[in-house]
Amino acid sequence: MVLNVIVVDDSALMRLVISRALRMLGLPIGRIDEAGDGVAALAALRAREFDLAIVDINMPHMNGIELIELIGRDAELAQLPIVVVSTESGKARLAELRNRAIRFLRKPFDPERMLEAVVGALGGQP
Amino acid sequence: MTVTPAIRTMTEVEALRTAIVLAMERLCFASADGFANDLPSSDTFEASVAFRGPVAGSVAIAMPRHALHSFIAALLLPEVADDRLARTDFVSEIANIVCGNVVPRIFGRNSTYTLSPPELVRPAGPPLATAVVHFEVGWVAAMLYRAT
């Protein structure tokens, strides 16, 4: 089984960094699609199947929190494992994500933390 | 306990330094060579990120244009090191990371702060605190501004 991933970040450079880091984790990563905001991500998620979404919070048009809310309300997407990769790390925000069983990876991250977050989001079954 | 302005300023400078060091170590594998509190005179590339919460303000980042190529190449992305968009993205992302790390350190982790998308400008007026970190190929400065 391969994991098809969507990386959602408004920074093209960060999408490249995250995609490259994903490929270095030793996981069976298949296709990696990219989206620059929540609107583009939602369109991609409804058009193709993904096993994991890596989502930034601070984005224009539709931010990561709005995207996660819409994913949660969509019957087809609600079970999609999500890792939030962001610089925002207030306790309230982290608690909000934890309540939704969403893993959080703080920027800047190291590969070990990324592996931990991805495997955790996938329920320990990469 | 009363916190004097002098101590608060040191704390803000330390927070800015720590955030720069963390961002550059993790993203560019760059180790700090030294610290300063004054912005060196140079042709710089700048970006800032505004934050809103119980306190509002912004964090700006400046780095010399001549060092950008080396910083981005160190990010293991030599193929895009001369790309203008990659440079803009890099400075913006460093501003985003430093702001996101500095705000909870200085103003506390119990409140939620919202960060605005990065802008390629430096806020007007004098900053509340400035920290400069020198690396082998150049320096990175971070400045904290409070909204009036």
Image (cartoon, coloured by chain):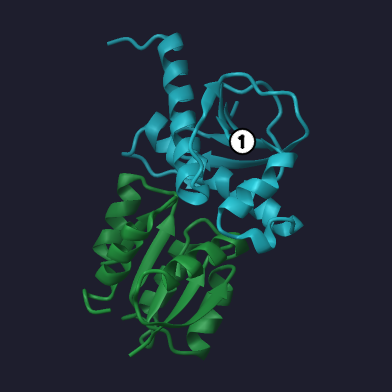
Chain colours: A green, B cyan
Q: Residue furthest right?
A: B43
Q: Is residue A53 above or below residue B94?
A: below
SS at circle 1: strand
Left or right: B106, with A97 as reference point: right
Task: Report the label total.
Answer: 1
Q: Is residue A11 left or right of residue A25?
A: right
In the picture, the quarter occupied by the C terminus of chain B is top right
Q: Amino acid at mark 1?
A: Ala
In the image, is residue A53 above or below residue B72? below
Q: Residue furthest front?
A: B136
Chain letter behind tag 1:
B
The image position of residue B98, as x and y in percent, is: 50, 40
In the rendering, at what x and y percent does residue A97 appear? 31, 60
The single residue placed furthest to the left in the displayed view is: A124
Instruction: Please state if B41 lies on the left or on the right of A125 as rendered.
Output: right
Residue B90 percent location from the top left of the image: 62, 51
In the image, what residue occupies the spot 21% across and 74% down? A124
Q: Which residue is mark 1?
A: B60
Asked whether the viewer can see residue A26, the reply is yes
Residue A61 shown left or right of residue A108 in the figure? right
Q: Residue at x 36, y 12 (%)?
A: B3
* Viewer-closest of A27 and B78: B78
